Image (cartoon, rainbow, N blue to C red):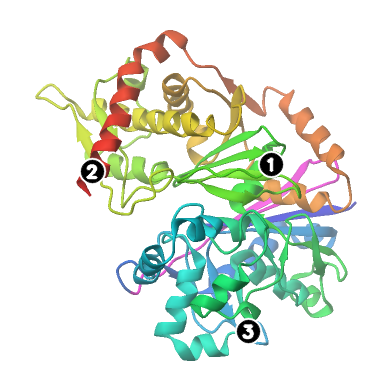
Amino acid sequence: MDIFLGIDVGTTSIKATAINESGVILATAQVPCVMQTPKPGYFEIDAPVQWRGGFLKALGILGGDVVASARAICVSSVCASFVPVDETGLPLRNAIMYGIDTRAAPQFERWNRDFAPERRSAIAGNSFTSHSVLPKILWLKENEPEIYARTAQFVESSNYITSFLTSRYAWDRPSAAGGHMIDVERGEYPTAFLNEVGIDKAKLPPLSYPLDILGEVTADASAATRIPMGASVLVGACDVNAEAFACGAFDPGSLLLVYGSTLSTLFTIDSFKTLPGFLTGPSVLAGTYRLGGASSSGGRYLDWVRKTLNIELLSDPATDMGPTGLLMLPFLDGARIPHQNPDYKVLWYGMDSSTTRQNLWKAAMEAMGCELSVLLQRFSEVARLPTFAYVTGGLASNAQFLRVVSDISGLALRHFKDVNAAFGDALMALSSAKDLEHIRAILDDRRKNPANVEDIEPDLPKFAQYDTMRRQYQLAAELISKLV
């Protein structure tokens, strides 16, 4: 039996899924990852220990017989996280993580000051931020010049593993666009810009699409992993793209909401369009494009509120009550899409002596719905919105949370249960042997089974009740923009 492997390199863990050609999940695994914070604002990871070591441990949990039957493998990345490697593929320092790592603030602020908006928007969609890879590469050149000089390739987290399997390098276009590395309309590296800022283009891997075949498992890699020599290795994609594949949100007109540590959105469209404040560029399938990015809210904000209020459970009966009348802006450590301002702060308004912890906890979830309403309004400026959004991620398992978000935003939500980016990776691996219609048929079968899918429709009377809160949220965000 041919088996197809999916590996998701996440922030806090590596997940693995093995499926057969019918899409049946045969085995899963999860291995924790540990980040390092050597200085405030610095977030790093030991790539050989955490990424490659975690990958090998995950294969061991899947089981030798499963791994030995693998026909193809696909790995998804922690988008905009990278590590410099030498000619042999050996990391020269710890990997530098995505937007949470703010070390390159002087570099991206310099670019935002020195380059005209049209130059920035062609690469970064709006302005360079802490999620931008190129300013961090420049930071490395300016602060660790000996490391930069010895670097043969800057590889993303997924390609660090896939290059170990194939001895080949590539950066997938959606991830490169998400990390502000390419001309987002052409889908290629901005050669003139790189020359102007002093970054050697030769140190950046070739660009490909996620479903392209990177190469085959080498004899040495097979001996180390038990994956058969000659098994296909796909280029792979960012984790949010893998989440999209896991539920079928990869065709134009589909909208994906990933409620993990942050809210990541992926709105797939059939032609290139720009939207200030949002990431744009190539999507998973060649010829398709996406709008979206990561917000400042999601599980990270809710977890901060929960700990601050000393609330033990994410779920609480208070979520069944109507609007709290309390207003929260969930800009923990700055605001990402659509505001793109690291100086925004959390705002709580409307409390009085009768306010309880339960009220505040409900207000935190209401903030998620208000934020989504803003994003939907902006998406509607450039394309027709779908009738529902696919929703995945850890918070999607909380039905009360989804109910609040749906009621406030007015958007129907379709939650695929028990799937994650690793399942999407496995489906992408399967695409090397079967066409996309086969993948769509697998996903259609899953949709027809109530055990796999939960559909949540908004309560329209409640949606009307939240009109004031939605307007207040927008006004408060505008106020903060004038204060910072």
Q: Is residue 367 magenta?
A: no
* Residue at disc 2, secondary structure: helix
Q: Relative to 2, is 232 above or below?
A: below
- The picture quadrant where one finds residue 481 is top left
Mark earlier in primary sequence (1, 3): 3
- Of the numbered discs in the image, which one, if any, rests on residue 356? none
Disc nearer the start of the sequence (2/3):
3
Left or right relative to 96: residue 358:
left
Distance (Cα) linking label 2 and label 1: 34 Å
Q: In this view of the protein, which residue sits in the foreground, 212 or 442?
A: 212
Mark sitting on residue 482: 2
Pick whichever, 428 or 13, lies toward us: 428
Relative image position of residue 145 (x, y in whole percent): 46, 88
Residue positioned most to the top: 461
Q: Residue at x 47, y 29 (%)?
A: 377
Q: Looking at the image, can residue 18 be seen?
A: no
Numbered range of the magenta stretch: 14-38
The number of discs equals 3
Q: Nearer the viewer, residue 403 or 295?
A: 295
User: What residue does disc 3 label?
Assistant: 152
Could you tell me if the residues under marks 2 and 1 are in contact, i.e. CB atoms within 8 Å?
A: no
Q: Where's residue 314, x and y in %?
A: 38, 34
Write down the residue under mark 1.
271
**367 relative to 343, above or below:** above
Residue at the image point whose x is 65% and y is 45% from the top:
272
Q: Is 32 part of what is drawn in magenta?
A: yes
| Vertical arrangement, residue 242 with respect to residue 50, above or below | above
User: Which amino acid, mark 3?
Assistant: Ala
For mark 1, give the secondary structure: loop
Q: Indicate which disc, 2 or 1, sits on the residue closer to the N terminus.
A: 1
